[in-house]
Amino acid sequence: MSKHLYLLRHAKSSWDDPHQKDFDRPINARGKKAAPLMGRVIKDRELDIDRIICSPSKRTRETLDLLQKEANLKASVDFVDGIYEASVGELRKIVRSQKDKYEAILLIGHNPGMESLLADLTGEFERFPTAALASIKLNITEWRDLDPDCGKMEWILRPRSL
């Protein structure tokens, strides 16, 4: 049985307060529409996600909250500090550390990490705007085997195209 990895970039964030730390920026009005939209995509496509790994930033938490409500996801959630500003190697390490009982993981993070991880795992170079969701079928049976070029991108969806 192969593993499945879904990558989601946080919804559009607000820049209203120029003194606010990047980590603490909330999502804006556009983001509050896009996150539930992607939740509906997850629900409509019946994606069987059994684990969510999420950056602890304010905008990723808000994205997750709106997405979960719409998708009715019951997957266990882990907020991992290392996702924020992570390199591809760090993101791969976080996913590799997951228990093999999880078949499909949703990783919610930031760019350039999401875009770079997609390219690293699939060889596909795609624009990854806010709230974009990508599906990667992995040619592995254990998370620890997550390596460059071990996956195939099945699709990528961007809110503006829906």
Image (spheres, helix red, strand yellow):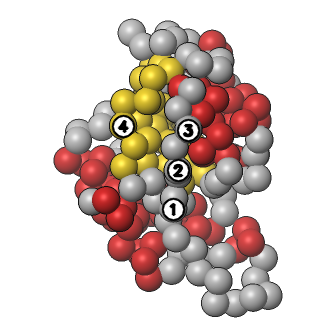
> Quick one: quadrant of the N terminus?
top left
Q: Amino acid at mark 4?
A: Trp
- 99 or 112: nearer the viewer: 112
**Residue sitting at 64 percent across and 90 percent down?**
16
How many residues crowd mark 1 within 10 Å: few (<14), some (14–19), many (20+)?
A: many
| Residue 149 higher or lower than 25, as above or below | above
Residue 155 disc label: 4
**Residue sitting at 68 percent across and 51 percent down?**
112
Among numbered discs 2 and 4, the one appearing first in the sequence: 2
Q: Amino acid at mark 3?
A: Phe
> Quick one: quadrant of the C terminus?
bottom left
Q: Which residue is mark 1?
A: 130
Q: CA distance from mark 4 to mark 3?
A: 12 Å
**Residue sitting at 65 percent across and 40 percent down?**
116
Residue 14's spot in the image, x, y percent?
A: 59, 81
Q: Which residue is mark 2?
A: 127
| Residue 138 higher or lower than 56, as above or below | above
Secondary structure beneath label 4: strand
Among numbered discs 4 and 3, the one appearing first in the sequence: 3
Secondary structure beneath label 3: loop
Circle 4 or circle 3, nearest the eye: 3
Q: Amino acid at mark 1?
A: Thr
Secondary structure beneath label 1: loop
Q: Amino acid at mark 2?
A: Arg
Circle 2 or circle 1, nearest the eye: 2
How many residues crowd mark 3 within 10 Å: few (<14), some (14–19), many (20+)?
A: few
